[in-house]
Amino acid sequence: MSLENEAVRTDADVDDLVGIGFGPANLALAIAIDDHNRTGAEPPLRVGFLERQERFGWHRGMLLDGATMQVSFLKDLVTQRDPRSRFTFLTYLQERGRLADFINLKTFYPTRLEFHDYFEWCAAEFADRVGYARTVTGIRPLTGPDGRTEQVEVVSEALGGGDAQVRRARNIAVGTGLTPRLPAGVETGESLWHTRDLLFRAPELARRGLRHRRIAVVGAGQSAAEAVEYLHRTFPDAEICAVLTRYGYSPADDSPFANRIFDPAAVDEFYAASEESRRTLLAQHANTNYSVVDGELIEALYRTAYQEKVAGQERLRVLNTTRLIGAEHTADGVRAQLRSLTTGREQALECDAVVLATGYAHVDPRELLGDLAADCRTDEQGRLRVDRDHRVLTGDRLDVGIYLQGGTEHTHGITSSLLSTLAVRSGEIRDSMLLRRSGRDLRARSAAVTA
């Protein structure tokens, strides 16, 4: 199903779903819909996706050699929904000729590079349903004479402008991912970047050469620790400064009981809980995901720092209880302004580069929804109200399904932006669409009989 120009579309060509963004979340949804269509159910669901990137990619800037996933391979795009699907990680391994080899590794945690290859293997099946290198510029409601909106037009254009296209849809799935979070007042540049761009910018830094022989990494989470380890290994003549507001890296709680918060059943429990209970659960289990690091990596970094201290050549410096309060771009790097949280003393650190491992923030989907946003219901804190099926609750006159792939921690819990429940969530969204289509068809038949 290729993207079509507005001029040649008819009402019969309306998509059941247009997915905005084609990362792992909407890829899992594409698979769930494909699995349904392959059952022979009629009519099949008609879908298409729009993606800003020129090809499928998932955190390419952090596909570091040897870095492993923090989730089991069984939490792939389908297994927890249907282990018989042809899109399981094990089927991928079989097709790649590595199934026996992977079994011999005796691990549940493949490398990030291999899991990305699995994602690409899945995405290749949907190349004809994805418009790559396109950005959505608007979503226009199509309101009928009765005042109800049952369809929207999703307007997109090629990156760089031009080639405007329109897709009509009865449902949309917003899966635009996360945006890098930056410290207040800090702007990225040639020598200051987010970890998202680590593998793209580090080679440029190597080509330019290091004048100060110093790189600072700001942050205390998994990405920060991985960046420190990578830069320490890649630039053997440079000092790598880990800037932490804590005393050191904190280990992630990946114990079996704590991991139950990532189970699909936990989403039901979280959704049914009171607002106070939800806040408590998120606070109590923040150490399963936020600003925490794999224990083995923590030990490896500490061992490196200790061995360098013994040798009298300390290249790995941990500047703990320290905050980045500013960064000035200079002709040959960045001047990082730091402040000690314990003494209040400030210092300037001349760096060849500063890497921000400061996490990501959700993008408010209302920025994309345009006029539709006025019909979206919100709670007392101004957050979107989202039903259990991941659909935004809307006013009665809007009958278009707006499904959110992320940004729903306040309603669905900690797995909202993680891989853990993608397989199950995609099935829930698909089934919601099918149920709503059945209801719409039933109403149409009833209206025809009445007429």
Image: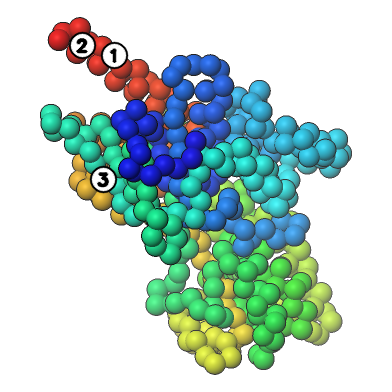
> Which quadrant of the rendered structure holds the C terminus?
top left
Callout 2, which amino acid?
Answer: Ala
* Image-quadrant location for residue 395: top left
Question: Measured along the vertical axis of the image, is residue 125 above or below residue 68?
Answer: above
> Relative to 400, does residue 154 appear above or below in the rendering?
below
> Mark 1 sits on what residue?
442
Q: Can residue 294 be seen?
A: yes
Mark 3 → mark 2, Cα distance in angstroms: 28 Å
What residue is rendered at 13% in x and 31% in y? Answer: 145
**Residue positioned 46% across, 23% down in the render:** 44
Residue type highlighted by circle 1: Leu
- Most foreground residue, 153 or 329: 153
Q: Residues within 10 Å of mark 3 (few under 14, many from 20)?
A: some
Tell me the amino acid under the disc marked 3.
Arg
Instruction: Identify the image quadrant of residue 274.
Output: top left
Which numbered disc, 1 or 2, marks the residue closer to the eye?
Answer: 2
Query: What percent of the width, then of the height, locates residue 381?
Result: 26, 49
